[in-house]
Image (spheres, rainbow, N blue to C red):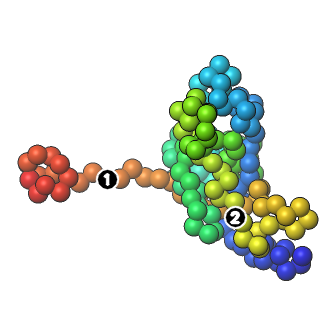
Amino acid sequence: MEERLAARKSETAEFLLIGKRERHTHNTWMHNSPKLLGKETTNYAYLHPEDAVEKGIRDGDWVRIKGLDGAELRVPCRLSADLKRKVVALPHGWGHVYAAGWHHARERSGVNVNVLASDSVWRIESFAGMTWMNGIPVDVEPVRPAKRKKRKSGSGAPGDGG
């Protein structure tokens, strides 16, 4: 057990990822009902405003959240002074791309936060044998729109040389 805890403490990243519950989605079960879910179409990563300023992120910008083993998610960001610094909160229960029979839920985007959880033996809580679901070391960076290349005259298709 001490060996696992030491390995866990040695993992470093700029942020710690925690889950977040949202009243309007109630974990997942409201996602397939248009009347219950309302206007929300995605989940958001929540950052402290001071962390966002340091990273050049504004409210509504897209961010990349990357785990230590290379898994990553891209999601829009909201700022919240209710969070502790260097913590990113991402609501769970989204990302229903493969959910059979959930046609309303699949119409909404959102990302599945579980992608960032690991099944590595060093990242499993030993008592229950469960993956660590909170306090996951991650890095967060802004997703910048790709710069458009100036096109020469021609068809306008990329790579046509004009």
Classify residue 138 as left or right of residue 150: right
Q: Are marks 2 and 1 in contact (CB under 8 Å)?
A: no
Instruction: Pick whichever of labels 2 and 1 is earlier in the sequence.
Output: 2
In terms of depth relative to the viewer, which is nearer, 150 or 123?
123
Classify residue 109 as left or right of residue 32: left
Regarding residue 44, the answer to whether it shows in the image is: no
Residue 113 image offset from top left, x and y in percent: 66, 51
Q: Which residue is mark 1?
A: 147
Image vertical order of residue 39 relative to residue 2, above or below = above
Residue type (three-letter) at the residue carrying disc 2: Ser
Discs 2/1, front? 2
Q: Which residue is mark 2?
A: 118
Q: In the rendered image, which quarter contains the N terminus? A: bottom right
Q: Farthest residue in the front direction? A: 101
Label 1's element?
Answer: loop
In terms of depth relative to the viewer, which is nearer, 35 or 78?
35
